[in-house]
Image (tube, rainbow, N blue to C red):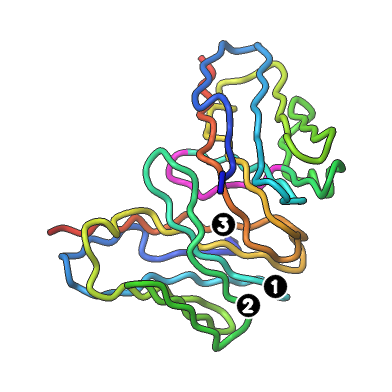
Amino acid sequence: GAGVSQTPSNKVTEKGKYVELRCDPISGHTALYWYRQSLGQGPEFLIYFQGTGAADDSGLPNDRFFAVRPEGSVSTLKIQRTERGDSAVYLCASSMGVRPDTQYFGPGTRLTVL
Amino acid sequence: EDQVTQSPEALRLQEGESSSLNCSYTVSGLRGLFWYRQDPGKGPEFLFTLYSAGEEKEKERLKATLTKKESFLHITAPKPEDSATYLCALNYGGSQGNLIFGKGTKLSVKP
């Protein structure tokens, strides 16, 4: 079946601009996760949703980052006033349940802030 | 102090040369330990989940084991196509649903 999909695959933006990254989880998966991966590092947790609500947003670095999942399926990660330090690969994952459960990852969106 | 430490950072093997990758952790209340494979430019691909000490899982040339403070990923007679970065991740009492990842071991298998 279809896996987790993320769009766009690459995004180049200028410092100070606003960006949206989209994640389409595996059908039927109730939990959705966002991670950020810098070069040479493992993924770093940002936020996860159980259904429509953000169950844990403790990994969001600051208030420029925000994520939504209005209908409990597709999620959008929004970054305001982008900074060069935001450049990374943003990964999305989904799972059937939460604690613990195998998370299946998408291919990621590579964000470059010039 | 890192909660998850993977070693070595990089490993070069000849085709057919078996070895092991290590993942050690300092957290308590482990709910699950996960191994993923990541190829360049792609998202992590799930390999194994281990829940309790003594548990073992196998898939083709890979075997994952778990003790109270570490996990090993054993690679038997590797092939060049096994070349990738192998990531270890934890779900534990303080992290609710999210995974805590190590930095990974980059494996290169030469023919």
Specify whether A46 is left or right of A63. left
- Residue with the mark numbered 3: B101
Specify whether A54 is left or right of B72. right
At label 1, the amino acid type is Arg
At label 3, the amino acid type is Phe
Which chain is home to disc 1? Answer: B
Q: Secondary structure at mark 2?
A: loop
Closer to the observer: label 3 or label 2? Answer: 2
* Residue B110 falls inside the magenta stretch: no
Assess disc 2: are there few (<14), some (14-19) or many (≥20) residues with their C-alpha within 10 Å of its C-alpha: some
Q: Quadrant of residue A76?
A: top right
Q: Residue at x 77, y 32 (%)?
A: A67
- Residue A109 in the image, given as x and y percentages of width and height: 54, 31
Q: CA distance from mark 3 to mark 2?
A: 16 Å
State the extent of the magenta-drawn residues as a range. Answer: A39-46
- Residue with the mark numbered 1: B31
* Residue A41 falls inside the magenta stretch: yes
